[in-house]
Amino acid sequence: MFKTILFPIDQSRETRHAVETVANLVKTYQSRLILLSVVEPPEPDAEASAVMTSHEAVAKLLAGAKTLFTEQGLDAETVEREGKVSFTICDVADDMEADLIIMGCRGVGLTDEGASESVTNRVINLSPCPVLIVP
């Protein structure tokens, strides 16, 4: 049913909470697992303090996540891309022919103010495949 599962990761608590769900679905459906992390280009006027703007931090995050899944007996491919997070997730899902995207959710999109800014909300609206949100 789900031949390819895309799991976009960052350093959030919500991503860590979604790991068990991802592992269970990959095992159940014997899916190909793709771990994606996106390097966000810094905004011109923003301070350069965001961790996910560093290629080194993203590479370390992907390596750690791959190890975590390997310890559970699962193979995982890693993909690092640069760009706007929500658009990049959807592009990679399309390029990799993902059947499912699994994401953690911070709940920011549940408010009127946060809905337009929420990566999760944008991915749900733009995704070429179903999106499973793990609260």
Image (cartoon, rainbow, N blue to C red):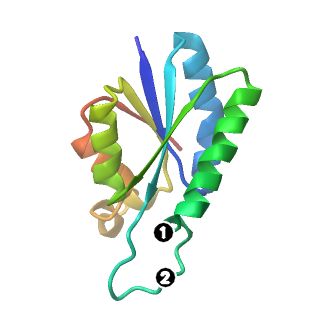
Q: Which residue is drawn at 63% across and 36% down?
A: 19
- The x and y percentages for residue 112 are 30, 65
> Depth check: 42 or 86 in front?
42
Can residue 133 be seen at all in this image of the molecule?
no
Residue 79 against residue 118 in the figure, above or below: above
Left or right, 96 with reference to 33: left
Left or right, 104 with reference to 81: right
Can residue 101 be seen at all in this image of the molecule?
yes
User: Could you tell me which secondary element the residue under label 1 belongs to?
Assistant: helix
- The x and y percentages for residue 38 are 44, 54
Q: Are marks 2 and 1 in contact (CB under 8 Å)?
A: yes
Question: What residue sits right under mark 1 in the picture?
Answer: 53
Q: Which residue is drawn at 59% across and 62% down?
A: 56
> Depth check: 36 or 110 in front?
36
Crowd band around label 2 with a 10 angstrom C-alpha radius: few (<14), some (14–19), many (20+):
few
Q: Which residue is drawn at 29% across and 33% down?
A: 95
> Depth check: 114 or 4 in front?
4
Kind of residue indicated by mark 2: Ala
Farthest residue, direction right: 71
Crowd band around label 1 with a 10 angstrom C-alpha radius: few (<14), some (14–19), many (20+):
some
Kind of residue indicated by mark 1: Thr
As measured in the structure, the alpha-carbon distance from the residue carrying label 2 to the one carrying label 1 is: 8 Å
User: Could you tell me which secondary element the residue under label 2 belongs to?
Assistant: loop
Q: In which quarter of the image is the N terminus?
A: top left
Question: What residue sits right under mark 2 in the picture?
Answer: 48
- The x and y percentages for residue 57 are 60, 62
- The x and y percentages for residue 111 are 36, 63
Residue 76: quadrant of the picture? top right
